[in-house]
Image (cartoon, rainbow, N blue to C red):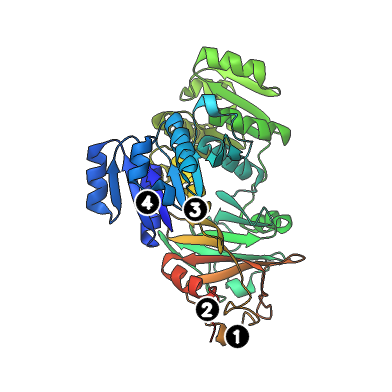
Amino acid sequence: MYVVVIGMGQVGRHVLRTLEYERHGVVAIDADPDVMREVEEHHDVATLVGYGASPKVLREARAHEADLVVAVTDHDEVNMLAALAAKRMGCKRVIARIQGDAWATCTDESGVEYGFLGVDVTLNPRVLLAQEIAKIARSHGALEVIDLAADRIELVKMKLDKNSRMLHKQLAKLQMPPNTLVALIVRDGEVFVPGGADHLLPDDQAYIVGLPSNILAAEDLFSAQREARRVAIVGGGVVGKALAKPLVRDGARVTIIEKDRERAEALAGTLEGVTVVHGDGTNLALLLEEEIGRSDLFAAVSHEDEVNLMACLLAHRAGVARTVALCHRPDYTDIYRQLGVDVVLSPRLVASDHVLRYSRQTDVKRLTALEDGKAEVLELVVGDTSPVVGIPMKSQQLNWPRGALICAILGRERVIIPRGDDVIQAGDTVIVLATRSAIKRVSLLFRPRLAS
């Protein structure tokens, strides 16, 4: 696949690294010569210095021959112009990131719009991030919630504390709800796909996959928390506003703390069912006065990372059970977690993840990176001549690689979390979770057999 990536910020670099690792042909474009020199030093890709929306630059990048053009600069208008120009030149698919306040309504509530002004896919990472937090609020203590296969499968991340009743038990002996399983364990920063003889230990983080109707019951085995009925939000920008709406629809009591008076007054006039407080989210006296400690979930989603971190730490001190912080610098996320923030989300990583989902060829429908790319979730469509067709899961003939797990099999009339006797059929969609080292071997298993 030949891809042109415009904008070498953190989103563009993350997309570039992944596509380079998969050995796609990539051209990187940025207007800053210093940035491009750094790209040349660390990546084996073609580079161009220039204005990404310029037809001249796009012609030099051979955008008319590209399978995909990804426009992810920090300027929405540049992204839209670049995507439209590339599409007009003949590029097969174009993706543009738009995230400013003026563009907040240009995608639907999912944060994704198809065909907007002729662009194949437009993504608003701030709205996407709000949707991520809303899913966490609906969960029973999950740190991450990922919908797969058009919401027919759900993947959630749970943390085990020292009092968890799931500790020190063999996974094979856990009485998990039907159609759920522990798919991945994160321990001391390392990830592995567990076997039936493995045990869960304190401070482990477990990814559980299952049918949405059963996943809450699985979460209840790992956590005593329930869905958030009272939610406090610091920051009334695009993220805060987009987050408040679904929470109110779900029946939660929502409070937004906004420092800017004009914005606070505008929010109070447009958001029904939301209490808007004009004030500083890092003012402990204000948090105590507003009884923020009674909140089930506290989300700090302002434009300032320092404010989000401090607000979450103060919210914990006030008694909040679960905190979420928006962090614009992905390299700081581990520090936030070490300091006690429960969930740390980066709009740049959210954007990168979604761009990569839409950059795959037809046999891989979607991809989600886990734990900074240490593991990935793939959705693959099984062809008639794929080597996996007709072989039971437990058969050694399948030659399934270590570090990979078939999490779900989806057909037209069935959705199953597979067991040993289950068989993959041609036309099925298969959800696979794999550590990075196992991905290539998984892909080989799903390639069609060559004709003899």
Residue at point 47%, 39% (across, down): 83
Pointer 4 or 3: first along the chain:
4
Residue drawn at x 62%, y 26% as measured from the top left: 255
Location of residue 58 (image quadrant) = top left
Q: Could one spot residue 8 in this view of the protein?
A: no
Q: Which secondary structure, mark 2?
A: loop
Q: Pinpoint residue 258: horizontal percent, then vertical percent.
A: 53, 21
Residue 16 is marked as 4
Secondary element at tag 3: loop
Asked whether 447 or 319 is in front, the reply is 447
> What amino acid type should be assigned to the residue bearing mark 2?
Trp
Residue placed most toward the observer, 150 or 259: 150
Q: Where does the image place residue 184, in percent across and percent down from the top left?
A: 52, 64
On screen, 97 above or below 356?
above
User: Marks 1 and 3: CB-CB under 8 Å?
Assistant: no
Q: Amino acid at mark 1?
A: Ser
Res. 395 mark: 1
Q: Secondary structure beneath disc 1?
A: loop
Q: Nearer the viewer, mark 1 or mark 3?
A: 3
What label does residue 400 carry, if any?
A: 2
Residue type, numbered disc 3: Ser
| 174 relative to 350, above or below | below
- Give the x, y percent position of residue 298: 56, 34
Which residue is at a point 28% across and 54% down the rendered structure image? 43
Question: Badges 1 and 4: C-beta atoms under 8 Å apart?
Answer: no
User: Which residue matches tag 3?
Assistant: 359
The span from disc 1 to disc 3 (Cα, nearest Å) is: 33 Å
Quadrant into which the N terminus falls = bottom left
